[in-house]
Each structure stands twice: as C-alpha cells, then as structure tokens.
Amino acid sequence: MERGTLRVSTDWRPAICVQGRPETLSSRSIRLKVDNLGPVVAGQHIDIRLTADDGYQAVRSYSLSATPRGGPGGTPLGNSEVEIAVEELPEGEVSPYLVEALAPGDPLEVRGPVGGWFVWHPTDSEPVQLIGGGSGVAPLVAILRARIASTSAVPMRLLYSVRAPDTVYFADELASYTTSPNITVDLAYTRVAPHGEARPPGRLTDRDIENFVQEPGSGIVYVCGPNSFVAAVTDLLLARGYDSAAIRTERFGGA
C-alpha cells in the first residue's frame, strides 16, 4: 500500500465478538475476530454492519484501537483480531447494541480496514504528536500500541481532552505509559478535574498547544474527535504556525 493512498476492502466479511470490556460507564472495548482479515495499519477504521430479523441493515464506522500486532500495552492479539472502542449514544442504531448486548461468540459483519492517510507505520521516523477528544482517542491509542509493539523509538506525545476522570478511555494503560521511553501523556479535563490538578477545567486553548504540543516543524500531528473538536484544534495549530501538511485529521459524528 502506498503512503497516502486510500485502502478500502469492499467485501463484507463475517466476524465474531471475542470479548468485551468496559472502558467508561457508557463505553466498551470490543475485540473481534474477522475472517480473512488483510493487512492492518494503526490509525485505520472498519465498517460494521448489523442486520435485523426483518432484513433492515445499519452500518457504522469505528476506528481501530488495537491491531493484530499491537494490542493493549503493545502485546499482540490473536490472528485476524482487532479491537474497537464504542461510546453508547442513546439515540444511536448501532452503538447501544454493541455496548449493551453484543456477547462473545455473537456474529456481525465487517468491511475494511479502511484508510491510508491517518495511519502510522513503525518505519516512520518523524516525532508524533497525538491530540484526541473523547472517544477520538481510540485510533491514537492504536498508534501508541503499535509504537510500543515495534522496535521504533520515535518520540510520541498524546494530549487527551476529556470531560472528567471517569470518562477517560484506557485509563490504566495511559497511566502506565509514564514509564515508557519517549512517550508522554497529558490529560486536559473540560468539565471536572481531579483534586490537585494544576490546569483548570476547560476546552483546549492556545496555551495548551504551547504547553503540551511539540513545536511546529518537529513532526506530524494527528487530531481525532468530534467535528467541532477537530476544527477548533486545527485552528489552534495553524494559528501557532503549524504547517497544514503536517496535520492529519479524523473526525466523526453520532452512531
């Protein structure tokens, strides 16, 4: 696959749920085993299709939070296995089922992986800045996991904007990265901060970009989150002098 091209598998493949585990009160990590899964790169996403008894179908896209070679903590998953992180939306057609009902052994259909721009390869040599909002941290964690699973020593820094301590995805794992060489994790709370947190709650500002983001021109920046979050962060980066060519974005709406 050439860098910068879009890789799309148009074939729907059968998959089964291997396991699910809570991330927050309203979200869940789900491990899937996909038949004939092709090459997977950190940062890609898959489409999931559910079919009701009456034939009605619903399709949603979810970023991969783990790849076969880079699972939680950088440990490998099983062959043809990937993970996604799903936030339950009360009015959603797909996410309530995935979070509340999907059980190990249950079938579904998967298409992908998809994506050739918002990806990271272990051979990439530039420093990496990751900026995520809410569940948008999922593909960024996939990149961190791929980095840890590889022999790469590329510096990576994650700035994670999240509402409150109890809404942090992958909380224990992110905390463990403080001992990983050349990896830095900074959390910015928007509504409620832990006791003793120096930064007051609030959305990301130009000061946060100055304090927690690598200098312009020093590498690639990946930004993922809701549409408004990605737009606001991109504006902050551009205002601080970042080259638009060095900013890679992935945004999403409801599911």
Image: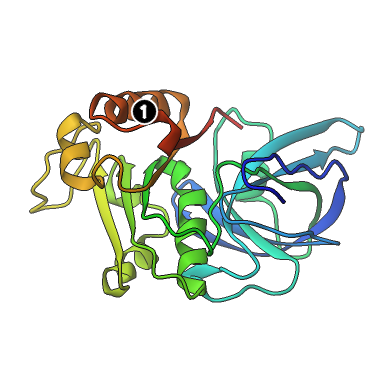
Displayed quadrant of residue 243: top left
Residue shown at 42% from the left, 59% from the top = 170
Q: Quadrant of residue 133?
A: top left
Q: Of residues 108 and 2, which is closer to you in this image? A: 2
Q: Is residue 18 above or below residue 241?
A: below
Q: Residue at x 32, y 71 (%)?
A: 176
Q: Secondary structure at mark 1?
A: helix
Image label count: 1
**Left-right relation of 12 to 136:** right
- Of residues 36 and 4, the one nearer the viewer is 4
Q: Amino acid at mark 1?
A: Thr
Tell me: residue 163, above or below residue 126.
above
Query: Going by the image, does 154 lie left or right of 97?
Result: left
Q: Residue at x 81, y 57 (%)?
A: 15
Report crowding for label 1: few under 14, some 14 to 19, many 20 or more residues within 10 A (C-alpha).
Answer: many
**Looking at the image, what colour scheme do you see?**
rainbow
Q: Is residue 104 or residue 234 the one in the foreground?
A: 234
Q: Which residue is mark 1?
A: 234
Q: Position of residue 98 (x, y in %)?
A: 65, 48
**In the image, residue 211 lies at what x, y percent?**
15, 44
Give the x, y percent position of residue 87.
52, 43
Please name whichever residue, 40 or 195, is drawn nearer the observer in this view of the structure. Answer: 40
Which residue: 75% across, 35% down?
59
Dividing the picture into quarters, in which one does residue 231 lie? Answer: top left
Q: Position of residue 156 (x, y in %)?
A: 35, 58
Q: Is residue 16 above or below residue 140?
A: below
- Quarter of the picture containing the C terminus is top right
Left or right position of 6 against 234 = right
